[in-house]
Amino acid sequence: MDLATFAVQLLNGVQYGLVLFLVASGLTLVFGILGVINLAHGAFYMLGAYVAYWLTLQTGSFLFALIGGIAIAFVAGLALESLFIKRLYGRDHLSQVLLSYGLILVLDELRHILFGKDVHSVAPPAFLTGSFKLTDVLSYQNYRLAICAFCLAVAAAIFFVIARTRIGMIVRAGAENRDMTRALGIRSDRVNRLVFATGIALAALAGIVVAPISTVYPGMGDQMLILSFVVVVLGGIGSITGAAIGALLIGLTDTFGQVLFPSFASISIYLVMAAILLWRPHGILGARDV
């Protein structure tokens, strides 16, 4: 592998890892703060891509689709938390799995009613079309570079909110010890609602930004959900920093695995996960290891 090819694959791995972080960060927040296993998280990734397709088709503006898709997902998250998810707090994991699986079925049927089974494509913004030339024969899409920059900006915003704001302090306290935050009299209902809605919006955002470089198709969130759980477990439940490290690690492992060991690429990420969990059973930044 020459240097230019290595650079392309490195960029692909970083871009994949950053998108995966958007999904996994929302999942680890919901799981770590609310204690809820949300199997429907991947369905919102898929719906984000479909909403991006529909809004782009209606308005001709991908930027409008980006903003509108985030807003729709956030409002949907607020409604779902108020109607269903808040009833799961303190319940056993079986109840959470059954309800979230029911949400998967409902969301998939809603997708089928609204968009059918067709595969769709989404055009990137006009100013991001074209590619950046690396060598005479290799180039890299401008939109993929924009994804990297955008996801880094979103990640920076997430870390700023978690580390520097009052709501972030409550979120960190809840991730560390939910019972203690309740005992201290911190009203968690609003925070829980915002955390869940933010998690859903982040999953949808990942689907939106990926839509122009990947076809929009039914079930596209299934694999992303599995990988997101891998990242959450790998990084340590409730740890945003751990999710970032895990997502980049999985993104690079999967990307280079497809190039170097295509026959074993599908299991490479699970081998990495097994190796790290043998070293740190609670994840890279798991609560008991901090």
Image (tube, rainbow, N blue to C red):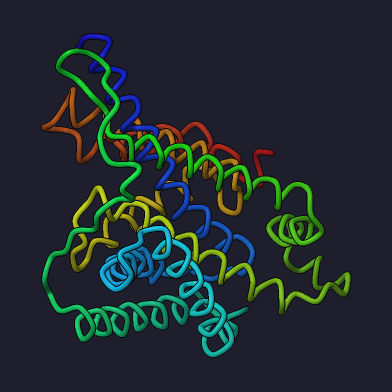
Res. 288 image quadrant: top right
Can residue 230 be seen in the rendering of this structure?
yes
Residue drawn at 24 percent across, 58 percent down = 122
Looking at the picture, how far across and down is residue 219, in whole percent?
A: 22, 66
Q: Depth check: 220 or 7 in front?
A: 7
> What is the quadrant of the N terminus in the image?
top left
Residue drawn at 41 percent across, 54 percent down = 229
Can residue 281 be seen in the rendering of this structure?
no
Res. 134 image quadrant: top left
Q: Is residue 41 above or below residue 107?
A: above
Q: Is residue 106 above or below residue 67?
A: below
Q: Residue furthest right?
A: 184
Res. 41 image quadrant: bottom left
Residue drawn at 19 percent across, 56 percent down = 215
Looking at the picture, how far across and down is residue 23, in whole percent?
A: 44, 55
Q: Is residue 171 above or below residue 271?
A: below
Looking at the picture, how far across and down is residue 14, in whole percent?
A: 39, 33
Q: Residue furthest bottom?
A: 83
